[in-house]
Image (tube, rainbow, N blue to C red):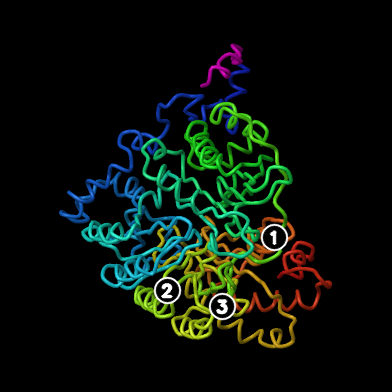
Amino acid sequence: MTETALAGASTDPAASRKANRPGRPAAKPHGQWKVDGTEPLNANETWKQEDNGLNVRERIETVYAQQGFESIDGTDLHGRFRWWGLYTQRKQGIDGGKTATLEPHELEDKYFMLRVRIDGGALTTEQLRVIGQISVDFARGSADLTDRQNIQLHWIRVEDVPEIWRRLESVGLSTTEACGDVPRVILGSPVAGIAKDEIIDPTPLIQELSERFIGDPELANLPRKFKTAITGHPSQDVVHEINDVALVGHVHPELGIGYDLWVGGALSTNPMLGKRLGAFVLPEQAADVWLGVTSIFRDYGYRRMRTKARLKFLLADWGVEKFRTVLEDEYLGYKLNDGPAAPKPATPGDHVGIHEQKDGKFYIGATPTAGRLSGAALVSLAELLESNGSYRLRTTPHQKLVVLDVPSENVETLVAELDKLGLSARPSVFRRGTIACTGIEYCKLAIVETKVTAATAIAELETRLADLVESGQLPQALSLHINGCPNSCARIQTADIGLKGMMLPTPDGEPSPGFQVHLGGGLASDNREEAGLGRTVRGLKVYVADLPDYVERVVRRYVADHIEGQTFAQWAHAADEEALQ
């Protein structure tokens, strides 16, 4: 009990009983290091203090890779391995109805998902080739682009991890802190340094943060994961509203170019959009501001309950004014300038299509199917780009790839060849707007399959709604986000149509995989008037097999009912529940 609670406690027995009735527990500390001390308040915090997650690398290299999966300490396996981008993957053949009933060791296989950390999404073709060959040699050809700009591989054996690290690090890549209670990958604009309309290039800042702080033991025990997004592009292309800390480039009317500061965004089962602190960050202040916000999370973040151990909960309790005051007074030692919000984006932030760079060359944004590729395709892509004069590319927060530095004379040839690899620079509305999480194929938390479901839905909708495309009635942008569980890795609350995986009852009593539906969400990078979360309609759930039917039905209803100029999201929030069924 805190000192404040003790001071206010009553000595009256009746009052004491009343205070301790079920549903009204006595006040408990949140586990904030600067308030409650650093004594661990749960098992997770205990093992993090006993041995920093970064230290497990030596054991992986010298013990576990030599002696195999069975030699791995349980706390390392289910905890510290994440600090190096490793999670055990789901055992094949376990249906979604058992996800919540089986113990973790019953769900997991002896193979790992390995997450390659790609800060700012920046890759060379040499790095891409190395990732692709690792996939071919060690991951059964698996390769998924994530909406955090990482590449995930599957079927990894612990015996192969040291060699994988050696290959990655030989080309300047790593898996350091790709998972865990640490600063995760830094999202960055996929067109940083090359876009004609860029406000500020965040590449030097992203590189500085990565070099100074990733792998730093002082920041390797946060309450939970900590996500960063930085952009200098006017499309605000890094989904900044759903990151713990974000810097959005814009021009201050008096101070010139800098960043608007956002904090406290995150989705999962309790979604909250980030808040502007009203502070304008000069470029030379940006690294210190990032460190200050991260340190606030370390020192004041809630550690007692992991369900509350995200920065969004601290911000909700403190409010913007207190958060900014603590940042300035305790961590920066100076006041930040006030600043206005960045202007609303005028273009989508996924960068799909063909665009001229500021140097006269072109960048091409290409879309795979729901982020899925293969190791062989990555190797072929590296060779294709090099043969067309491009040696750089970027991953994006929308499960896309952006190829840089393409000479004008090679653009159409490259577009055609990309298409043969399953990467479309001129995708349909549905292929462009659909993203999907890993799903039940590999994820221990998942309830339904996602990648094949997404691919099937895209193909069906392209055929079924071809008449709306031909007549020009189909919205030019429509996002469909498919998630295998409630945790929202695919950002379901921020999609026009967001789908949360769950088991649904059937007439014969056997549960069947399906989705709860969220409608009308979106972020600035979706070219929305204002960021907002989707609405849920009571009882609106869809079986996986019926998904194309539902999407076709609701899109046709939108086309028939919306008023001129009304987006799908606006219509979905205004429509009667009957229209959304």
Across the whole image, how many numbered discs are drawn on residues?
3
99 horizontally vs 358: left or right: left
Amino acid type for the residue under numbered disc 2: Leu
Of badges 2 and 1, nearer the viewer stands 1
Between the C-alphas of marks 2 and 1, the distance is 30 Å
Residue ranking furthest to the top: 11
What segment carries the magenta color? 1-13
Q: First in sequence, mark 2 or 1: give its number.
A: 1
Q: First in sequence, mark 3 or 1: give its number.
A: 1
Q: Are marks 2 and 1 in contact (CB under 8 Å)?
A: no
Amino acid type for the residue under numbered disc 1: Pro
Residue ranking furthest to the left: 67
Of badges 2 and 3, nearer the viewer stands 2
Q: Which image quarter holds the C terminus? A: bottom right
Q: Secondary structure at mark 3?
A: helix
Picture disc at residue 373: 2
Q: Secondary structure at mark 1?
A: loop
Residue 352's spot in the image, x, y percent? 58, 72
